[in-house]
Amino acid sequence: MSAAVPAARPEATAPETPIARRRSVSVQQFLAFGALIALFAFFAVASSNFLSTSNVFGILLAASVTGILALGATFIIATGGIDLSVGTAMTLCSVMTAVFATEAFLGLPMPLAVVLGVAFGALLGLINGLNVAVLGIPPFIATLAMMMAAAGLSLVISGATPLYFTSVPGFGQIALGTLIPRVPNAVLIFLVLAVVAGVLLNKSLIGRYALSIGSNEEATRMSGINTRSWLIKIYVLAGVFTGIGGVIMASRLNSAQPALGLGYELEAIAAVVIGGTSLSGGRASVLGTIIGAILMATLNNGLQIMAIPQEWQKVAVGVVILVAVFADNVRRRRESRV
């Protein structure tokens, strides 16, 4: 009797190792940094005013708000989710900070008003997290609904008019003051938050579980981790960053502009993806997000200096977003074939 021949087993695709994941992120960061240098070189040649000290710090100031929003979005995108509400939620946090701080409303002490403005961002993040983790609503739909609701509430609460902080002494110094000569405080806050975000992503449970959920949520759940609870915490963390961004934006303008905010979510997402965080989840980089935020601010600033019409500026930003997403898809397809 001939021995039975065992059935051939299909070849299993080896999971991506941490070393391979870090290498892929590093390559993306290098490419993003190269693109940033190329943009600086192009605009420096196109305009003699581009490399002036005041303009460079202006770019960093513009990048600070987008970057703070992008830091929070990095954690959400690391889980394989998305947050379309960061722009209008930032605006709503600005409006609520004005409600807490200005004499026309509650007139609370400025430090308390700032804390409550940031806490309101955490509340919005909590709502997003509950909708996604508990109700099972897809992140795209849950945050799209929040985006629309936040935009409407900003107009309703403010009466569709700007709310000014002229009665709040020192509020403008939060963003525009200079603890370090010539360096706006908003830039320092952005850098400090970037360090905090880097530590949380790479050295804490919330970062580890965000990446684990993004890699394989079901396997993470089967290993005994309460993925619902951690998803809620991740969205709350992102909401805190959004709240801080709202306070910084209000301080920078010395007013809460209720119609502001739409479009910031796309720039934040683009900054995250440009920096190497994968839209499919499981891979993220805070350093890459910083580079992406500065790149987006550089692009906007350079186009403005060259007096490119605003319509074409939006086209350019749209093209950058499309290229970033396409590059992410190409990278994922290549890795799936390895």
Image (cartoon, rainbow, N blue to C red):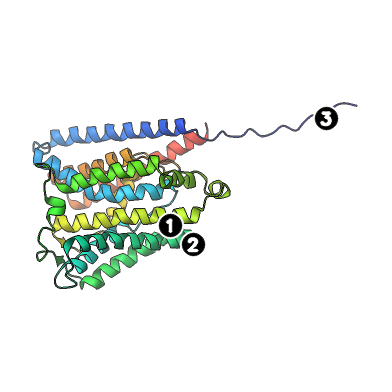
Provide residue 165's location: percent of width, then percent of height: 13, 64
* Closer to us: 116 or 140: 116
Q: Nearer the viewer, mark 3 or mark 2?
A: 2
If the image is split into quadrants, where does the N terminus sit? top right
> Left or right of 168: which side holds 190?
right
For the question of whether residue 277 can be seen, the reply is no
Figure quadrant of residue 21:
top left
| Residue for point 36% across, 47% down | 74
Alpha-carbon span between mark 3 and mark 1: 53 Å
Q: Which residue bears the numbered disc 2?
A: 134
Figure quadrant of residue 36:
top left
User: Quick one: label 2 or label 1, which is nearer the N terminus?
Assistant: 2
Instruction: Give the secondary structure at mark 2.
Output: loop
Label for residue 4? 3
User: Quick one: label 3 or label 1, which is nearer the N terminus?
Assistant: 3
Provide residue 3's location: percent of width, then percent of height: 85, 27
| Residue for point 21% across, 47% down | 189
Mark 3 Cα shell of 10 Å, populated few (<14), some (14-19), many (≥20): few
Alpha-carbon span between mark 2 and mark 1: 9 Å
Mark 1 Cα shell of 10 Å, populated few (<14), some (14-19), many (≥20): many
| Residue for point 44% across, 48% down | 79
Instruction: Give the secondary structure at mark 3.
Output: loop
Provide residue 71's location: percent of width, then percent of height: 31, 47
Three-letter code, disc 1: Ile
Provide residue 293's location: percent of width, then percent of height: 26, 44
Label for residue 232? 1
